[in-house]
Amino acid sequence: MTPIELYTYQTPNGHKASIMLEEVGLPYSVRLIDIEKGDQTRPDFLALNPNNKIPVIVDRDAGRTVFESGAILHYLARRSGKLQPTSAQEADDTLTWTLFQAAHVGPTLGQLWNYKVFAPDKMPYVIGRFERETGRVFRVLESRLNNHENLVGKSYGIADVMTWPWIHAGVIKLGLSLDDTPNLARWYAAIGRRPAVIRGIAVPALPEASAAA
Ligand SMILES: N[C@@H](CCC(=O)N[C@@H](CS)C(=O)NCC(=O)O)C(=O)O
């Protein structure tokens, strides 16, 4: 099989795709898109994703280009036959929790990171709003994980792959505590020990360690 090309950078959204590729074991090659230098606005990249964001995959054997991390995870699950829902109920729940990630977890933590770390003016109202919203999102995940080992079903699946990198960014980059959300903390620690996750968050190797939102 021709390796799938992964266009990515050292960010939570990029890590969703690299973790998934590591989990399912499909051959892939990495194309570094340095979003801090503006590679994502080059015409050749815009031809792959008009939304100028990583990650993107190109599967030449299948004639497919896929952008949006959630779409990439669903695509790779189908392509590999791995980490797929095992029932109609699980398929519905997987859609729900991957969309919850895309609509709430990623955007909320991404805005918190932006306003807390990158904004030249630290605006207390805006930071406070996204801190409160992050707490709310964490409590939603906590309540789900209170009676589920993983976000969907008994087995680790794409909803977990989709969500974990943003919780990791919250802990590592923003110093957020999971002390008040013990089930989220238990889920976060268990997934963080998976060899594919450890390999996936090392992708792409950067010339010098840096990461962006
Ligand atoms: N909804 C998109 C979000 C992707 C995204 O925000 N990517 C960021 C890096 S984490 C990016 O490429 N930013 C570059 C830019 O906005 O110019 C997805 O899930 O794939």
Image (cartoon, rainbow, N blue to C red):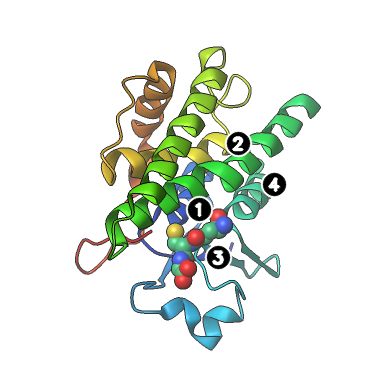
User: Gap in Å between the C-alphas at discs 2 and 4?
Assistant: 9 Å
Depth check: 150 or 133 in front?
133
Q: Position of residue 213 (x, y in %)?
A: 38, 58
Amino acid identity at mark 3: Val
Between marks 2 and 3 in the image, the one whose residue lies nearer the viewer: 3
Which mark sits nearer the N-terminus, 2 or 3? 3
Depth check: 83 or 176 in front?
176
User: Gap in Å between the C-alphas at discs 2 and 3?
Assistant: 20 Å
Vertical comparison of 162 with 187: above or below? below
Q: What's the mark number on residue 192? A: none
Judged left or right of residue 79, residue 57 is left
Q: Quadrant of residue 46?
A: bottom right
Between marks 4 and 1 in the image, the one whose residue lies nearer the viewer: 1
Q: Position of residue 142 (x, y in %)?
A: 49, 21
Q: What's the mark number on residue 56? A: 3
Judged left or right of residue 94, residue 118 is left
* Tag 3 secondary structure: strand
Q: What's the mark number on residue 78? A: 4
Which mark sits nearer the N-terminus, 1 or 2? 1
User: Gap in Å between the C-alphas at discs 1 and 2?
Assistant: 13 Å
In the picture as drawn, the residue positioned furthest to the front comes out as 125
Which mark sits nearer the N-terminus, 3 or 4? 3
Amino acid identity at mark 4: Arg
- Write down the residue under mark 1: 17
Is label 4's Cβ within 8 Å of ligand 1?
no
Q: Residues within 10 Å of mark 2 (few under 14, many from 20)?
A: many
